[in-house]
Image: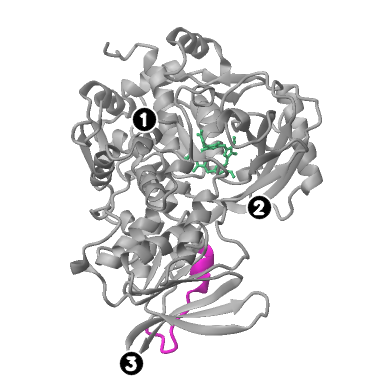
Amino acid sequence: MPISSSDPRLVVNTLDVLLKQCYSSPACRRHAPRRHYATGTSTSHINHEATDIAVLGGGITGLASAYFLSRNLPHAKITLFEASSRLGGWLHSRTVDVGTGNVVFEQGPRNLRPTNPNGFVTLDLVRDIGLEDRVLMTSKNSVAAQNRFVYYPDRLIRMPGPGMPLLSNITNLLSEPIFKGAVSGAFFEYMKWRPKRPDDLKDESIGSFISRRFGSALANNVVSAVIHGIYAGDIYKLSARTILPGAWQSESERGSVLEGQLYAATTGRRPVATDDVEIIKDFNSQLAMSDTLEAVKKSSVFTFKGVIGELSDRLERKLLGSRNVQIHEKTQVNRVRLQPDEKGLRVRITIEDVTTKETRDSDFTHTISTISGSTFARMVRSDEKGVFPKHPVSLAKALSVTVMVVNLFYSNPAILPVHGFGYLLPRTIPFEQNPERALGVVFDSDASIGQDEVPGTKVTVMFGGHWWDGWNTYPDEDEGAAMAKSILNRHLGISEEPRAIRVSLQQNCIPQYPVGHERNMQKGHDQLERFQGRLRVAGNSYTGVGLNDCVRAAKDVVKGLVDGTGKTGLESFVGGKKYSWVTAEDLNEKR
Ligand SMILES: C=Cc1c2[nH]c(c1C)Cc1[nH]c(c(CCC(=O)O)c1C)Cc1[nH]c(c(C)c1CCC(=O)O)Cc1[nH]c(c(C)c1C=C)C2
């Protein structure tokens, strides 16, 4: 049945759309040069100058970049440098003995989404490295996929969505203070009675965009909570253009976000970044060859049977088994510069052995940096003759937030008052009610079932993010543990002592894309272009903060290097996004 503009389902649809928008990473709809995603690359286009390549950083982007390079350039030498003593970056899992068996505590990302084009690139990698049989899926019908809560003003409110009966959705929308203004907000938005975006406005904060289109209550109470769960960031600082590209585009094209969504729903056509079309088509054609991939694609999220870090562990193992790859851990890169010599251009890297403090220079034909934009930009120096004097200063502006992650395990399997993915706290919860500055709580024992050896309840409490911007010191482990217990007691009535608790401070773990991010990255691209394709970047500082975004960035930067379609890794920011309105058939999607 078609949805009319006065139908409350429009509001349910609005919230669902906004939630999905936030969950799909920015890179997934970004315009990038057309690429073909087969694992290998046609040899006629291979960059024969790329014989000795350095990869900076051993997180997921660095590992995936090295892996794609080793597959596509089997004759090149690939050297990966990592400053710490472990690979995997923010993928950090701890297996903890709780007396009766082991449980897994994830201290960073814990799940992957199999849905958008970047998710397909990850799934393709998972298949390629032989991890298919290790995949652990959470079904779309699971309690975790169906139940998402926001804490407001003093209780857990289930978010509307297709999994909830329509009547409950409507009752909730009309009665709960969290949705105050949502119905009229959606109606006004659809009717285009909201202030129009000025023609010269190139970007604005998510908070300002949502407030302008739907009203500030929706922005502050709902969207701020969702953004806490992804970016741990401030909706009044993060870029709407980067993080909500579909909504931003809909407003420009149709004057209304909801009209664009309604058009998609009623015509069966949806906007897909033109360059993602091939990825989706390729992936959908491959699905017939793998029952597992087909099942994963239909799931809500997935991880691996042991820990999420199986992805980085397997990549590491693959790299260690490659003849053309060397990995140097505990090796810090201090300086990077372009150096012309008799053989042409070289990237000269000064590295320091973290243990002995000895430094030395090494030359490479090309370098891919996957470390944070600000750290990288500070390393890049002028060459001795000053031919390449410009640092990629725009990249130095990269911001990030710190999150404290507290994992708790209780032997009692029936301790939670409700079940689901967990809950998020919006910015509107006053500090008196949230003195700990909690961002959200994940119900791990509902969200990823099958990793632990013993029954019980496992939750993760997260603190900080943008609330801790500018702080120089953070709570210590004892304080973090006490803060988590106090939150769980106040919000969920849990007064039992946990059987195990681990506190970790993830400093600067989530990059933030502030208003103007696209323009800044475009400038960064222009600055990097001066390095003539020898110096490229990829990673969560630029094109998306999720694991899928990192794998996609690795694939893209390597593709650009191998077949000459890119020079910097930031091509997707050049020239604006282009969308195609496509049907399921256009994408080889099975109904
Ligand atoms: C260390 C904390 C992190 C917070 N956000 C991220 C990390 C690593 C990154 C992130 N989280 C999510 C996404 C969305 C897209 C995706 O790739 O899945 C990204 C990039 C969504 C998300 N947030 C939380 C979970 C369990 C998930 C994924 C699964 C799902 O939607 O079912 C929980 C959560 N993450 C953070 C907080 C504060 C939080 C609180 C409940 C920050």
* In-image side of 482 versus 283 (left or right): right
At label 3, which amino acid type do we have? Glu
Looking at the image, is mark 2 or mark 3 earlier in the sequence?
3
Residue at which label 3 appears: 342
The CA distance from mark 2 to mark 3 is: 47 Å
Quadrant of the rendered image containing residue 407: top right
| Colour scheme | one colour
Residue at 45 percent across and 79 percent down: it is 337
Span colored in magenta: 374-387
Question: Relative to residue 418, is residue 120 depicted above or below?
Answer: below
At label 1, which amino acid type do we have? Pro
Q: Quick check: marks 1 and 2 in contact, CB under 8 Å?
A: no
Question: Relative to residue 358, is residue 102 depicted above or below?
Answer: above
Quadrant of the rendered image containing residue 254: top left
Residue 44: image location, x then y, percent: 18, 68
Residue 123: image location, x then y, percent: 39, 44
Residue at 67 percent across and 36 percent down: it is 461
| Dot in front, 1 or 2 | 2
Relative depth, front residue between 301 and 556: 301
Residue at 75 percent across and 38 percent down: it is 98
The CA distance from mark 1 to mark 3 is: 61 Å
Residue at which label 1 appears: 195
The answer to whether residue 316 is magenta is: no
* In-image side of 175 versus 194 (left or right): right
Q: Residue furthest bottom?
A: 342
Looking at the image, is mark 1 or mark 2 earlier in the sequence?
1
The answer to whether residue 378 is magenta is: yes
Residue 167: image location, x then y, percent: 45, 7
Residue at which label 2 appears: 470
